Image (cartoon, rainbow, N blue to C red):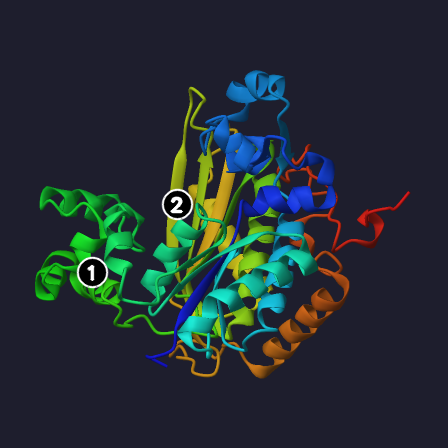
Amino acid sequence: MKDRPFALVDCNNFYASCEQVFRPELVGRPLVVLGNNDGCVVARSREARALEIPLGAPYFKIRAAFEKCGGIAFSSNYALYGDMSQRVVETLRQFTDEVEVYSIDEAFLALNDRPDLLPSLAGVIRRQVRRWTGLSVSIGLGPTKTLSKLANKRAKKEGGVCDFLEARGREELLREMPVEDVWGIGPRYQKLLRSHRIRNALQLAQVDEQWARRKMTVMGQRTVLELRGIPCFAFQEAPAPKKAIARARQFGRPLVDFAELCEPLASYVASAARALRQQGSVAGAIRVHLETSQHVEHRYANSTYRLLPWSTAATGELIGWARECLAQIYRPDYAYRRCGVLLTELSSQDIQQTNLFTEEYYDQKKRDAMEALDQVSAQWGRTALRCASEGLAQTWRMRQGRRSPRYTTRWDELPVVG
């Protein structure tokens, strides 16, 4: 595997492009996607970038000027983006079985072809993804993951494909890449490296690897070796089990009553529990947090952590303990805008540590019940069967007044050809 080249496939302006696929009249028009409750900009089309719309900008501040330039804003359409991401991945699997999904819009491929043939293969992959999904992608090629990530950054500026496979000529390309563009180099390491006059990727590749280990831990040492073309980051077809699972989101309106707050909390716990079961884990601890808006005079925020009496992935049990945690930190007379849950101390459901003081545990009966629940959700949708504590109307859900139709996942929202 060490001698096999990597390709990093990255969807261009993914959220914005998903919106344009089903509304081609928007191509060439400035477009932004908004985050929770249509608050801040979380994604931009190329045209919006040209207008220097910053990520994270509150939309109410830029709305007038943006719309004057012909811009249009959409609420985040997570169902659409997730489904389009899966379609891209399935297209990539036509070319190799070894696909590592890195994020919703990025995937690593391990390729078998000769290095001199890979640039033309990358072109074929780009055309196939475009033909089958309507999305454009950039592809970076390299002997390591880090080099393929760097190549992808350049590919976005040079027509879609960039090749860092051959050592000959790679030095000049690395010299042109700022050190902060290297995968894993965040603001703290950027400041450290610049203090030692290391300003580009080539200079980082040439530092002593033991110095890198002392100053940047073993991950820094591996990054240096990867920049030299020595693979250190393993290819993972299946994602490693998460060590913690979190769910949190702003409410669509302020909530005051404890009973009202229990509904979104139960919904977030149910979502986290589904993810927990999908990776075959149980949780041994839970953290719940609660907070008001930061922009009100009377602010309040608090959290509490609890070790559970036994490890479990049963939705009902986790909801019950989360409610107890919420009761500890809830204070009346505050208008709350956000709560969340974090499941930690995760372990395999097949290897459980029992409690000396109780006979309860996540037994086969509970596992069968949760499996039945997940099967119904998989066939009929997540809202087909849920805990009563999650509520029915769920008027607290975040606002999505600008959401486009869920074109690919809802029968009643399919595109109509006139």
Q: Which residue is mark 1?
A: 220
Which residue is drawn at the image coordinates 55% and 80% (left, top)?
A: 363
For label 2, the residue is: 303
Residue 310 appears left or right of 259: left
Q: Quadrant of residue 256?
A: top right
Q: How many callouts does the rendering have?
A: 2
In the picture, residue 3 is in which quadrant? bottom left
The span from disc 2 to disc 1 (Cα, nearest Å) is: 34 Å
Query: Percent x, y for residue 191?
Result: 17, 42
Q: Nearer the viewer, residue 276 or 207?
A: 207
Q: Closer to us: mark 2 or mark 1? A: 1
Residues under numbered marks 2 and 1 in contact, where contact means CB atoms less than 8 Å apart: no
Where is residue 47 drawn, in percent x and y?
A: 55, 32
Seen at 54% across and 64% down, the residue is 275
In primary-sequence order, the first of circles 2 and 1 is: 1
Look at label 1 and name its amino acid: Gly
Determine crowd level at label 1: few under 14, some 14-19, many 20+ residues with C-alpha closer than 10 A: many
Classify mark 1: helix, strand or loop: helix
* Disc 2: CA contacts within 10 A as few (<14), some (14-19) or many (>=20): some
Q: Is residue 240 visible?
A: no
Give the quarter of the figure containing the N terminus.
Answer: bottom left
At label 2, the amino acid type is Ser
